[in-house]
Amino acid sequence: MLGTIKHSSSRLCQTTLRLTSRSHSTASSSAFSPDELAHFNALASSWWDANGPSRLLHKMNPLRTSFIFDTIDAYALPSKTRLSGLKMLDVGCGGGILTEALARNPRVESVTGLDMSEQVLEIAKKHKRQDPKLVMEQKLDYKLCSLFDLPVPEAAAEGKDEQRYDVVTMFEVLEHVPDPSALLETATKLVRPGGWIFASTVNRTAAAYLTTIFVGEDLLRMVPKGTHSWSKYINEKELREWFIEHKTSVPGTGEHWDVVTSKGCIYIPFVGWEFCGPRDLGNYFLAARRLS
Amino acid sequence: MGSTTGRKFSDIQSDVYDVVIVGGGVSGLTLAAALKASPYTSALKVALIEGMSLAPATKWDPSPDQLSNRVSSITPASQAFLQKIGVWDYVYPERVRQYDDMRVWDGVSGARIQFDSFQLDAAGAPMAYMTENLNLQQALLESLAEAPGDNQVKIFDSTKVEQITNSTDQLDDVDLSSWPAVKLSNGSTLRARLLIGADGVNSPVRSYAGIESRGWDYGQHGLVATLTMEWDDRQDIAWQRFLPTGPIALLPMPGGKASLVWSTTPKLAAHLKSLDPKAFCTLVNAAFRLELADLNYLYTRSDPEEIEAEFEWRDGMLPMEDEGAKFPVRVVEVQENTRASFPLRMRHCDSYVAPRVALVGDAAHTTHPLAGQGLNLGQGDVASLMSVIERAVVRGADIGDEVVLQEYWAERYPANHVMLGVVDKLQKLYCTDSKPVVALRSAGLEVVASMDWIKKLIMKQATGI
């Protein structure tokens, strides 16, 4: 397994190299590839079926929300981090499984869900209407656009309130986009100082291939075939180093990103998703915080 | 959005609830009280529907020498939960009797087992608390009435559920089509984010959810009665003798009274109910004290004086030293209008949950009363469902989400399945007088009876602690 990590070149580094020779507009148009889009469009109608193809995502939701709020509670710097009244952005929100849970949380002031699939986002909007609390409180908003097309909110300045997000979440997103480095780069600009990026993806290891693709998709068919492509997985080390290389002391900005924690997680049949096992083996969650 | 209807969510908002509980029995009321007691869920809007009037419970003014025949054995685990949610403080303590000793024997072979808290290094720890269901219900209602005014559970009693469907509201802003709509006999329709079936063995909520219930009838009736004993035996013992027609149990109640649960054939149950009160008491005494052949002979008699004479003659031959050790104190009186019987059955639902639906208590499972677990399994359901709902609220999940509710089912189904299975096998094992089976079960019982560690293990299961 270690061998796999060593000789496979870092996916984030590769894409970063590509990114430098690419104009921003091309990156924008390719935030999501057409075949990925088609795959998720096909899943739209069954997104909220608790016993359907997205069951594993539904089951993962408690782990996601507890990771977000437990990390904020455990590592918050009271002078810099807000604990409630949180403004959140959910990138790649899909049918809104996580987005709705965030919006129902009393600590959250507003959530914007972004997705590139019109069909999937329609499902999210329709499903939101099934909960009068979400409709009445008006905390939840969905936008059909790429992260690259989202206007960067204004930073706090003389006479202006901070408009950037407290939290940007990117759960199970990085392994589905052609240029994860550019996506991360953009996300970091949207976060206010003291704010967070929470991301999850899968390590590019033989074990991950075996569990997520061979067993999950081919053998047990718990996950729709074609959901994952192994070559797009990102190792925990790569993601961690991306923050170190790109975001530690960005010259001239005083900006500083700190990878606060990362945890490996696995799906245990009859139990659910649990934080368990090494962070560099299969699925993992990572939390990074912006400081200045 | 297509055509608009002009109706908005705000038009129906007053009839929309987070939790609608169908059933005002102990399980339903406990869930309501627990929801109001928890800081995570106390803000939820809760309604409870009960077909009967709850006035007998709210206005309960019991006389000290009268006991209701609807009585339950409350395990320490259930008692601890009721304490935690602040309900136990409202229970009339003078109408609760604890027991810490249980004597069970085989009516065919006489093989015995005794569970005694004192002998099992748990001196003073009760095995169970006996009290009237009404005592619990009034305590639950009292605690519900204590909640702040704007936050109280809305109780619809003397109100029948006429129909449960998915909501058909056509609203411009909100889509409630996945929400159950409960049509009531008072004309209103309640919409529920989460609908709870605490509505007993023929649960309408279960029918709405399309959940299958499986099981069998035992072909026995449970005959209950409130009895007065010759004197108040302060040993606090629960007695149970397994007869081939079904177990007979005598559970101590306050003030020298006892509660009888006699599982027997429907024919015998009908006979016992119609018997002269004095003769009935004699037969209860006979069922605990006499040989099977003698008992079977007495069943065939109906003249009270003959029964009395036949019993006294046989009872006089029993050794004095067995009094109070092998048999309970004699029964001298049966309280008027307390003899009642009901069919005994085993039922277990395939699932306890469906989208926006959860079943608790008898709606999910029904068991034979021989282990005194019926009410306690329901309390276990409520405690589990409560923690699932609390967790869901904390994480921002929709409490009606099937994925959330499945956690409750996953936790409770195996536990209930084991308990129902053990009770069912015990029932079957003891409802025979086949010689080899009696020999085997008696040998087995004697082995268990001689090993304290097994007895402790059994006690732990039975008390839930």
Image (tube, helix red, strand yellow):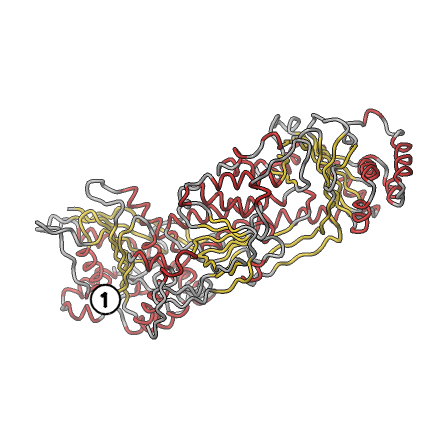
- Image coordinates of residue B195 in percent, x first then y, are 49, 56
- Image coordinates of residue B125 in percent, x first then y, are 60, 29
- Image coordinates of residue B123 in percent, x first then y, are 62, 26
**Which residue has dot 1 on it?**
A146
Left or right: residue B87 versus residue A26 is right
Nearer the observer, A71 or A225: A71
Left or right: residue A17 versus residue B40 is left
Left or right: residue A69 versus residue B364 is left
Residue B204, quarter of picture: bottom right
Q: Is residue A214 visible?
A: no
Nearer the observer, A19 or B232: B232
**Looking at the figure, which quarter contains the C terminus of chain B?**
top right
Q: Secondary structure at mark 1?
A: loop
- Image coordinates of residue B397 in percent, x first then y, are 39, 54
Left or right: residue A207 versus residue B316 is left
Amino acid carrying mark 1 in the image: Ser
**Which residue is depicted at the point 84% across and 38% down?**
B279
**Which residue is depicted at the point 14% across and 51% down?**
A161
Residue A190, quarter of picture: bottom left
Q: Local crowd at mark 1 within 10 Å, few (<14), some, or many (≥20)?
A: some
